[in-house]
Image (cartoon, rainbow, N blue to C red):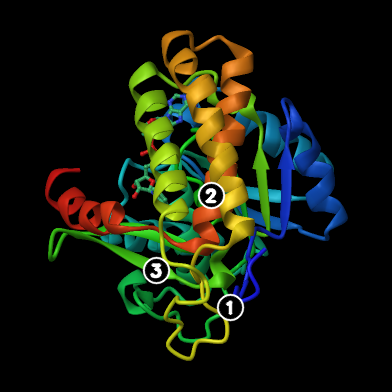
Amino acid sequence: MRTEDLIHFCAPGRLIIGNGSRHQLPQLLARLGYRSGVLVTDAFFAEKTPWVKEYTEAAERLGISTIIYAGGLPDPTTGLCDEATAVLRDQLAGKQPDHVIALGGGSNIDLAKALTLTLPQGRPIAEFAGDIGGCRPLPLIALPTTSGTGSEATPGAILLDPANATKIAVMDNALRPQIALIDPEFTYTCPPRVTADAGIDAFTHAIESFLTLDSALFERAGNPDPGYSGRSPLTMLFARESMRLCFAWMERAYQQGDDTEARVGMAYASIYAALSYGTAGLNAGHGIAYAVAGQTH
Ligand SMILES: NC(=O)c1ccc[n+]([C@@H]2O[C@H](COP(=O)([O-])OP(=O)(O)OC[C@H]3O[C@@H](n4cnc5c(N)ncnc54)[C@H](O)[C@@H]3O)[C@@H](O)[C@H]2O)c1
């Protein structure tokens, strides 16, 4: 504890973690009153795993209908988001969905996050960059399949803007998922390269947020609801544990993808890093990376 700290801690509305926890989702959504959803994913999950069918059939039995969008791509662009908005609005034929589900890595989660803003009125996502202007996004349910980005807990969607070859962030606390459901079994199919890239992402989130400005010094620019607001003992507690878990499990998850203990360890490392940086914010590494990634992917 430090007497000068000013903590404004934000997290997803519900956090569910556990092997096999995906099977609880249809009943939970039915109980929360959801009836009509859009599920955003990519071709791998739609065609090569049973998860999409398993979910939609179980949800259907409980009276929840779901439209599937399987056009997600790594590092989604603003153009992809606008295209997905048009395709989905066409399929919805004037009906408003009451939730959006994201299944995939950070790319699919960010695309789905952006769609929670664009689906209601069909506006281009670029109009929301920097400030969502008081717009109420649709509730988002995030099911991460990589242990890395932590997008299931953060207030931002990162999209590539091909017009100026950089990544843009659409940010607001209203964009944090209502439900982050982390089923480590989703990550068992992750190839080694994706496991390593994602694991290093989580580790970097933990380090950068551990070293960022103190909450008492963080410039909030008069914002009463800042997305990021500096490090505090609360965020540092998650960052420290995340770094420890990365040390313990990252290499094993990479070397032996079927090591369930290592996969679960990295799932915790990733969400703990997100619970740190999702409030504290990051540091120069990510600032530079946004510009570089726009040029190099
Ligand atoms: N919004 C945020 O807070 C935030 C934070 C960090 C990164 N990001 C964004 O996340 C994106 C990177 O996400 P990522 O690292 O999770 O990778 P990704 O979502 O881009 O996925 C990379 C590839 O791995 C595949 N894949 C993912 N999970 C798999 C699984 N379980 N089995 C088999 N294949 C799988 C995907 O289909 C894809 O082809 C970047 O666009 C980055 O900007 C967002």
Front disc: 2 or 1:
2
Specify the amino acid type for callout 1. Answer: Arg
Q: Quadrant of the C terminus?
A: top left
Q: Tell me the SS state at disc 2.
A: helix
Q: Answer with the quadrant where ligand 1 appears in the image.
A: top left
Specify the amino acid type for callout 2. Answer: Ala
Q: Are marks 2 and 3 in contact (CB under 8 Å)?
A: no
Q: Are marks 2 and 1 in contact (CB under 8 Å)?
A: no
Specify the amino acid type for callout 3. Answer: Val
Q: Position of residue 47 (x, y in %)?
A: 48, 25
For label 3, the residue is 170
Front disc: 2 or 3:
2
Q: Residues within 10 Å of mark 3 (few under 14, many from 20)?
A: many
Q: Quadrant of residue 92?
A: bottom right
| In the rendered image, the vertical position of residue 260 relative to residue 172, given as above or below | above
Looking at this view, is 83 or 13 the one in front? 13
Q: CA distance from mark 3 to mark 1?
A: 13 Å
